[in-house]
Amino acid sequence: MNSLFTRLLIATSLLLLLLFGLLWSGLSWYQQTSQQQVQQSLHRNLAEHMAHINPLLSQGVTEKAALTEALHDFMLLGPSFEIYTIGLDGQVIGYDAEERLIRQRQVDLAPVNAYLNGANLPILGTDPRNPNQKKIFSVAPLVDPANQPQGYLYVIIGGQQFDAWQALVESQQKPWVWAIAALGLILFSLLVFVLLVYNLTRPLARFQRDLRQLHQHKLKDGLRLSGPYQGSRELQSISADVDTLLTELNGQYQQAQAQQKARHEFLLHLSHDLKTPLTALLGYIDTWLVTPANQRDPELIRTAARSGQQLQRLLKQLLELAALENQQIVPKRQPLNLKPFLQDLADSYAPALSQKSIALDIDCERDTLVDTDPMLLQRILSNLMDNAIRHTPEQGQIRLQLHSQRKKLWITLTDSGSGFYQHQLDQLQRASARSTSQSPLPQLGVGLSIVQKLVALLEYRLEVESRPNQGTQIRIALS
């Protein structure tokens, strides 16, 4: 019952039955009306001729007692005619029938007047023998020798006996008519159904076949339907929507593959970053343990502690990067004066700079307000300072500058460190251009990954210029 074939068959059959019923009713009504119009037109002057040829009726006599013989003679015209005389008030006066057959003594004069005034036929009037059914009739006024109206001669066309014979004939013929009509309806329904199935289900079958074949292909091959469908507009719209979904699915698959590859490479890179301080930490501790107690150098423990701190910093950055990946960090913007902010940042790195004899130059001569999240901006600059100090050799130089350029406010960090190779720089710039919380991670360290995510979160712009062994310049557009 849920198949398209069954539903189409049922819907088509019911629709055709309804249409057949309406058509049959319409044709029956039209046939009956046409027949009544023809018969009433043929007998339009019947009552007038009857009144004219009968001596009593022509004198305006309407009483039943005087007209019994005349009415009986008129009934010889045939059983399909019923003849009455009625008064000016519509009361039935004379008739040639048994008393029990007359079931209504009053005739509605409105149709009579419409008939005499030449209204369009057919006109249906009261049937004294069958009040529940209106009949066509012929009528003529009856006047006395002084030309005074006395009543009407009222002739029912197609009387009670005519109805009985007609019902008998129809009862014998209708089963055959209905049987032929039902057979024609069945054949027509089958023809319409076959055409519907051919025009509707063939594109659907092709669409279903194409969908079944999709599971045999792999996403990397690029899933697509076989082409446009010639079915209904709805089917064309559905196929277009499916193609759109497949295109999006292919794009998401390619993006997921790229992210998976980037994450794999990132984990390899991260494991190397974690392995280096961990190996150093364990190596210095093992050396300290195997050295005799009176010969143990405290510098071994201090070096191991620095490796542990480096390992702790990497783990902290990794947790921070995971929070950014899961969109757990939301910016809280507020006005910030960048001059004291940058000075505080420089003061916090004074010990690390002094240890490597690196000179830090801060170029921020005036107070500058910017709407930002101070904590997130500090994380960005702290990661950049960490990388700059780590990659800048002793006696090197780092410059932190705040300036306006191209109608934007920029923070620029320049170092004289080892710099990036071109392929690393291209990778970082591509990642920055499409950076979101779900974008692939650049393979240039956790610190730069965090910077990239935070810059995208604050809707800033990141630009990097670098050459191997010639230093790096990183610029952040704040507005």
Image (cartoon, rainbow, N blue to C red):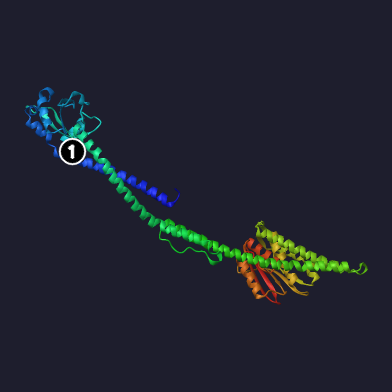
* Res. 371 image quadrant: bottom right
Outermost residue toward the right in this view: 294
Relative to 62, residue 450 above or below: below
- Left or right: where 388 falls relative to 121: right
Q: Is residue 204 left or right of residue 67?
A: right
- Left-right relation of 289 to 245: right
10 Å crowding of disc 1: few (<14), some (14-19), many (20+): few
At x 25%, y 42%, the residue is 28
Q: Is residue 390 left or right of residue 119?
A: right
Task: Give the x, y percent position of residue 296.
Answer: 90, 68
The number of discs equals 1
Residue 29: image location, x then y, percent = 25, 41
Q: Which residue is mark 1?
A: 119
The reply to whether residue 461 is visible in this rendering is: no
Measured from the top left, where is residue 315 in percent x and y? 74, 62
The residue at 40%/56% (across/down) is 200
Indicate the secondary structure of the residue bearing disc 1: loop
Q: Name which residue type carries label 1.
A: Ala
Name the one closer to the observer, 14 or 459.
14
